[in-house]
Image (tube, rainbow, N blue to C red):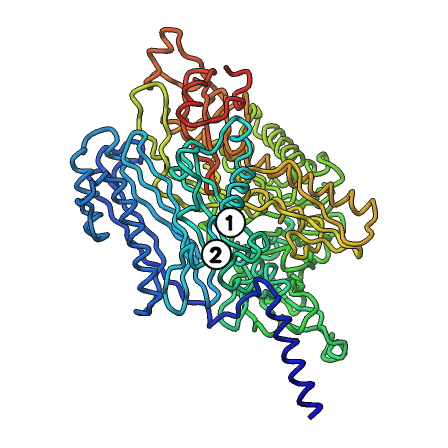
C-alpha cells in the first residue's frame, strides 16, 4: 500500500512539474518530409537568346523554382495551394489585373503575363519583363513545415516588386497555421513586433520616422515557426513610409505564455558535423573526400633521366587516423586506423595527379579521435627501368582540411644529385587554390596564401617572416611560369587573412608581377574577394537603357553562383551574401578557455574569426560591436585575445560588404558603357542598409574610357561631363541592390534620391 501511495505522489509531482514548464519543445510527429523541386521556366520573345539582357527589346522571362511534396497528402495539397496563390499574386501585380478579371490558375496567369508583354513589344522596357521565384526550407521537423518564397516581378521602368511569403504548416493535417493558431493574444504581440522594427530600422527612426496613426501597425502577412521563435517579414507595402523590407524573429522566451503551439524541437547535430561536411561529401554510408591535386616539379637532371629511361612517377596518398580506443593503438603494424591508400601513376610529360573520389566507410570516423584525418603524400619513380627508386622527393604530411580544393607542388631530384641542387625537399614548393567541388574550372589558377588568427603569413605550409620573404618565394615560381605561359600568370588569393593583410599581399603581388612583366602596377584596382567561404553571385544585368542621364538599375533576372578569385581581372561581379538574419551574434568565453558563437562551440581563434565574419555578413547592417559574454572567472589576456578577433571580424565583414557594393555599381557602369571598367573610389558612406558611392571611372587598363560611341559624347563635347559616377544602393535579402546611379557627375541629386528612395539625408554628408 505504501508503495502504491508513493507511486501516486510521484506521478502527481511529475504532473505538476511538467504543467509548470512553458514552451516545452515538441517531439516530432515523424520524420522530416521530403521536399522536391517544381520548376516553371518559360520565355517569349524574339531576342531572348540573341542579345544580352541590357540590349533586349522583346523578351519576357518566367523562372520559378518551387517546393513540391510527393504524393497527394493533405500537406502536399496545402503547400501546392499556398504556392499557387502566391504565384498568382506575383502575376496579378505584374499585369495589373483588375478585380474580377484576375487569372484563376498559374498557367492562365502566365499566358496573361505574356499577352501583356506582347502589347508592349518593341518598347525599351519590354525586353526586361521578368517573373522569378525561389524557395527556402526554414523548418522541417516532422511536426511543422515552414517554407519561404522569394518573389520578384519587373515590367519595365521603375515598376518592380520584391516580395516574400512565409508560411507554416501542420505536417499531419496540412493546415496552414494562422496567427490565431500560433499565439493566444495577437494584440499582446504588437508592441513586441513594434520594438523589433525599431531595433532593425533604428536609422529611419533616428531620421524622424514614426508609425502612421491613420494606418495602425499590424502583424505581417509573412510569418512562420522556426526552431528559435516566430519569423516575421514586413514587405515594403506593409509599412510603406518606412521603405524597404524588415525581417526579424520574436524568440520563444519573448513570447512567454502567449505561444499557443508547442515550440519546435531543436535538431540535435553531431559536434563536428560542420567540419565533416566541409571535408567530405556524404553518399549513403560512404564519405567522399573533396578533390585535391599534387604537382611534381623535377630538377632538370631528373626530368632528363626519367625521359631517357621511359620511367614513370608514382604519387602515393595514404589517409589515416588515430584511434579513440587505446587498445586499438596497439593493434596492427602502426596502431593507426587506415582509411584510404591510393597510388596515381604519371606517364610521359604528365606531372599532375588529381585525387578525386577517394571514398571510405562512414563508420570509420567514429573510431578515430579527430574526423579531420591525416594525409601523407610520397612521390617516387615507377621502377620501370630499375628495381630501385631513382628519386628523392619532398613529402606532404598534413590534415585533410589543409589540402581539399588545393594543389600542392612537390619537388623531386635524382638521389645522386647534391643536396643543394634542385627543388626544396622539405616543404611543398607552392600551393594553388582550386575551385570548390562542383564549381566550373577556373580560367587560371591562383597562388593561395594563408594567415593565422594573429596575422602570421604562410605559403605552401611554410611560414613567411614578412612580405619580402613571400615575395622572394613567389618570384622564382613566377619566372618559371613565364617560361611556360608568360601571358597568363597566376592570380593570388588569401585564406584566413584580414583586410589589412589581404590588401598588402595583393599590393605586393601587383608590384612583383609588374616588375617581371614590365607593366605598370594598376592604380587603385578594385579590391578582390577574400576567400572566406562566403559565396558570390554573378548576375546578368537587366538595366534598361534610360532616356535620361539617371541610370535606374533594375533587378537582375537570373544569377549563377560562382567563387570570385583574386586574379588580375578588374571587373568584379555583384556579391550576394548570406540571407539576412535579425539576431546579432554573441560570443561567449568560458572559464576553461572554451569559446562559443551563438551557443555553438568554436575550437580556435581562426574558426571564431571565420564563423563570426560569416555571421556578421548575414546581418542587414553590420554592427559596430559584438557582445562578449563570460562564464566564470576569465583572464584579462584571454578576453583581450577574443576581443581582438571580434574586432578583426567586424572590420573584415565591413570591408567585404563595401567591396560588394563597389562591385555592384561597377558592373552596372561597365555594362552601361559597353566596356570593362574599374572604379576609383571617392566616397563610400553607409546609413542603415543604404550606401552611397562616388567614384572615378577608368577602363580595365587604368586609362580613360572612350566615350565617343556612348550617349555621353555630346555632353563631353559641351564640357558638361565629369568622368565620375554616383550611385545609391540598398542592402536587401543578402545582396546589394542598385537603386539608381548617374554617370558624368560627381554630385548626387540628394533631394530627389531622398524623396524617391527614402534614403536618409545624412547618408550624403557634404555631397549636397
In this image, 342 relative to 469: left or right?
left
Q: Quadrant of residue 269?
A: bottom right
Q: Quadrant of residue 393?
A: bottom right
In this image, 494 relative to 743: left or right?
right
Of tags 1 and 2, the one toward the viewer is 1
Q: Is residue 519 visible?
A: no
Residue 215: x, y in percent? 40, 36
Residue 333: x, y in percent? 73, 77
Determine the CA span between mark 1 and mark 2.
9 Å
Q: Which residue is mark 2?
A: 183
Residue under the image location 36 percent in, 11 percent down: 715
Whether residues under marks 1 and 2 lie with C-beta atoms below 8 angstroms apart, the answer is yes
Along the viewing direction, whichever of 12 and 499 lies nearer the viewer: 12
Residue under the image location 29 percent in, 21 percent down: 547
Q: Is residue 160 visible?
A: yes
Residue under the image location 21 percent in, 48 percent down: 109
Q: Earlier in the sequence, mark 1 or mark 2?
A: 2
Q: Quadrant of residue 314?
A: bottom right
Task: From this view, report whether residue 635 is shown above or below residue 239.
Answer: below
Q: Which residue is mark 1?
A: 188
Task: Indicate the secondary structure of the residue bearing disc 2.
Answer: loop
Amino acid at each position: 500500500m505504501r508503495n502504491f501511495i508513493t507511486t501516486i505522489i510521484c506521478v502527481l509531482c511529475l504532473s505538476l512539474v511538467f504543467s509548470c514548464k512553458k514552451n516545452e519543445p515538441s517531439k516530432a510527429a515523424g520524420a522530416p518530409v521530403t521536399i522536391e523541386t517544381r520548376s516553371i521556366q518559360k520565355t517569349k520573345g524574339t531576342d531572348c537568346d540573341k542579345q544580352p539582357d541590357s540590349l533586349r527589346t522583346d523578351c519576357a522571362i518566367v523562372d520559378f523554382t518551387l517546393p513540391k511534396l510527393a504524393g497527394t497528402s493533405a500537406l502536399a495539397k496545402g503547400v501546392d495551394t499556398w504556392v499557387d496563390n502566391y504565384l498568382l499574386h506575383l502575376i496579378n501585380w505584374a499585369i495589373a489585373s483588375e478585380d474580377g478579371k484576375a487569372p484563376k490558375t498559374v498557367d492562365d496567369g502566365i499566358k496573361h503575363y505574356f499577352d501583356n508583354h506582347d502589347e508592349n513589344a518593341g518598347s525599351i522596357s519590354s525586353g526586361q519583363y521578368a517573373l522569378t521565384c525561389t524557395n527556402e526550407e526554414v523548418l522541417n521537423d516532422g511536426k511543422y513545415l515552414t517554407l519561404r518564397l522569394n518573389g520578384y516581378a519587373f515590367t519595365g521602368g521603375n515598376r518592380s516588386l520584391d516580395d516574400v511569403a512565409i508560411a507554416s504548416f501542420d505536417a499531419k493535417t496540412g493546415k496552414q497555421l494562422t496567427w490565431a493558431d500560433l499565439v493566444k493574444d495577437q494584440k499582446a504581440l504588437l508592441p513586441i513586433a513594434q520594438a523589433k522594427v525599431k531595433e532593425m530600422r533604428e536609422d529611419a527612426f533616428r531620421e524622424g520616422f514614426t508609425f502612421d496613426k491613420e494606418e495602425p501597425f499590424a502583424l505581417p502577412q509573412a510569418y512562420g515557426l522556426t526552431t528559435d521563435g516566430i519569423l516575421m517579414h514586413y514587405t515594403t507595402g506593409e509599412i510603406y513610409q518606412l521603405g524597404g523590407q524588415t525581417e526579424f524573429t520574436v524568440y520563444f522566451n519573448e513570447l512567454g505564455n502567449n505561444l499557443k503551439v508547442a515550440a519546435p524541437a531543436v535538431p540535435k547535430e553531431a559536434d563536428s558535423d560542420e567540419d565533416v561536411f566541409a571535408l567530405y561529401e556524404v553518399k549513403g554510408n560512404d564519405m567522399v573526400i573533396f578533390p585535391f591535386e599534387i604537382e611534381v616539379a623535377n630538377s632538370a637532371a631528373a626530368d632528363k633521366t626519367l625521359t631517357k629511361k621511359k620511367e614513370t612517377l608514382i604519387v602515393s596518398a595514404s589517409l589515416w587516423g588515430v584511434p579513440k580506443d587505446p587498445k586499438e593503438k596497439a593493434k596492427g603494424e602502426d596502431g593507426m586506423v587506415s582509411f584510404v591508400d591510393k597510388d596515381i601513376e604519371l606517364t610521359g610529360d604528365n606531372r599532375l595527379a588529381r585525387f578525386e573520389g577517394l571514398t571510405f566507410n562512414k563508420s570509420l570516423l567514429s573510431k578515430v579521435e579527430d574526423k579531420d584525418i591525416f594525409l601523407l603524400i610520397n612521390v617516387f619513380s615507377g621502377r620501370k627501368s630499375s628495381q630501385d627508386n631513382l628519386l628523392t622527393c619532398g613529402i606532404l604530411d598534413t590534415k585533410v582540411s589543409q589540402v581539399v580544393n588545393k594543389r600542392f607542388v612537390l619537388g623531386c631530384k635524382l638521389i645522386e644529385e647534391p643536396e643543394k641542387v634542385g627543388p626544396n625537399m622539405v616543404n611543398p614548393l607552392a600551393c594553388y587554390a582550386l575551385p570548390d567541388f562542383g564549381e566550373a574550372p577556373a580560367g587560371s589558377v591562383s597562388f593561395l596564401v594563408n594567415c593565422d588568427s594573429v596575422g602570421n603569413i604562410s605559403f605552401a605550409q611554410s611560414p613567411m617572416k614578412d612580405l619580402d620573404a613571400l615575395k622572394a618565394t613567389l618570384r622564382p615560381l613566377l619566372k618559371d611560369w613565364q617560361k611556360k605561359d608568360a601571358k597568363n600568370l597566376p592570380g593570388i588569393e588569401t585564406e584566413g587573412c584580414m583586410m589589412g593583410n589581404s590588401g598588402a599581399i595583393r599590393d605586393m603581388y601587383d608590384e612583383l608581377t609588374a616588375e617581371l612583366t614590365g607593366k605598370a602596377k594598376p592604380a587603385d584596382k578594385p579590391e578582390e574577394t577574400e576567400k572566406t567561404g562566403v559565396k558570390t553571385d554573378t548576375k546578368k544585368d537587366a538595366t534598361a537603357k534610360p532616356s535620361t542621364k539617371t541610370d535606374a538599375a533594375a533587378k537582375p533576372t537570373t544569377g549563377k553562383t560562382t567563387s570570385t578569385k583574386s586574379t588580375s581581372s578588374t571587373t568584379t561581379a555583384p556579391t550576394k551574401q548570406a540571407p539576412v538574419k535579425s539576431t546579432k551574434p554573441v560570443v561567449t568565453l568560458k572559464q576553461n578557455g572554451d569559446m562559443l558563437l551563438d551557443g555553438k562551440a568554436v575550437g580556435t581563434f581562426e574558426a571564431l574569426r571565420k564563423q563570426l565574419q560569416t555571421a556578421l555578413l548575414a546581418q542587414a547592417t553590420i554592427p559596430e560591436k559584438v557582445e562578449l559574454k563570460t562564464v566564470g572567472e576569465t583572464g584579462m589576456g584571454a578576453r583581450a585575445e577574443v576581443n581582438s578577433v571580434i574586432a578583426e571580424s567586424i572590420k573584415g565583414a565591413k570591408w567585404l560588404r563595401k567591396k560588394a557594393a563597389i562591385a555592384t555599381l561597377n558592373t552596372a557602369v561597365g555594362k552601361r558603357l559597353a566596356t570593362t571598367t574599374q572604379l576609383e573610389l571617392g566616397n563610400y558612406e553607409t546609413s542603415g542598409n543604404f550606401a552611397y558611392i562616388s567614384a572615378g571611372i577608368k577602363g580595365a587598363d587604368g586609362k580613360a574610357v572612350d566615350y565617343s560611341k556612348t550617349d555621353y559624347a555630346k555632353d563631353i563635347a559641351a564640357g558638361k561631363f565629369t568622368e565620375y559616377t554616383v550611385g545609391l544602393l540598398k542592402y536587401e535579402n543578402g545582396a546589394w541592390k542598385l537603386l539608381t546611379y548617374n554617370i558624368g557627375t560627381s554630385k548626387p541629386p540628394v533631394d530627389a534620391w531622398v524623396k524617391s528612395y527614402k534614403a536618409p539625408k545624412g547618408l550624403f554628408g557634404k555631397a549636397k
